Image: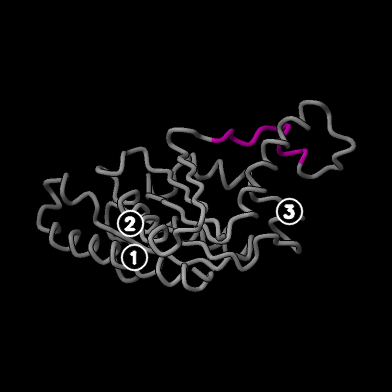
Amino acid sequence: MATLLHIDSSVFPTDASSSRAVTDAFRRTWQEQHPEGRVIHRDLATNPVPHISAHSHTAGFSDPATHSPEQAAAFAERVKLIEELERADAVLIGAPMYNLTIPSTLKAWLDNVVLMGRTAGDAQSVKGTPVTVVASRGGAYGPGTPRAGYEYVQNYLSAILADFLGADVDFIVPELTMAPVNPQMAELVPLFEASRERALDEATDKAKQLAQRLGA
């Protein structure tokens, strides 16, 4: 029975969030294809994880036998998140662009699960795990666009998830999501709608492919 770890970080509900709409399509298709599978949904907007503290950070670089009570308690919370990630057969992440980068709640989760000597570095305990990231953004930041140099979501998550953790990372990128609500972008609404439909189709296709790959 395969497990999908589904992480959302948009501050908006599904009916107002492009990233949640696409992750929801992915998850529903996964469940249809994988009726015996398990889905763990972690909503970082409604239930954020603790940001890294001095105790949880230093505990990650020291022998557990030497941990103070404060370090031990903080590190135990990190280990819970790490084990949840390690047990997942596939990971789905909703990562909207806020002020050119990922939400702080998603950064906090990453800071907790990236642990040198276990998930990162020479060990890479989640190496090869398929990770699908829905990287929605209000404008256009792809190669060749005027704002391509300001794309810090895919670049950052590729470095962390693929390079540090060794995961098999794939991106779905719905863009121009601000077009329906920004009058100055009104002429871009058709492009937004096309991008949204393409992202929903990609989510459905990728979920089916992944379910088959994992033996649904």
Secondary structure type for disc 3: loop
Callout 3, which amino acid?
A: Met
**Residues tagged 2 and 1 counted as in contact (Cβ below 8 A):** yes
Q: Which residues are magenta?
A: 49-59
Labels 3 and 2: the sequence-earlier one: 2
In the current view of this chain or complex, which residue is farthest to the top? 69
| Circle 2 Cα neighbour tier, 10 Å, few/some/many (<14 / 14–19 / ≥20) | some
Q: Residue at x 25, y 42 (%)?
A: 16
Location of mark 2 (residue)? 25
Quadrant for residue 1, please give it: bottom right
Labels 2 and 1: the sequence-earlier one: 2
Residue 127 circle label: none
Secondary structure type for disc 1: helix
Q: CA distance from mark 3 to mark 1?
A: 34 Å
Location of mark 3 (residue)? 116
Location of mark 1 (residue)? 204
- Of 145 and 22, which appears nearest the observer? 22
Q: CA distance from mark 3 to mark 2?
A: 34 Å
Q: Is residue 3 magenta?
A: no
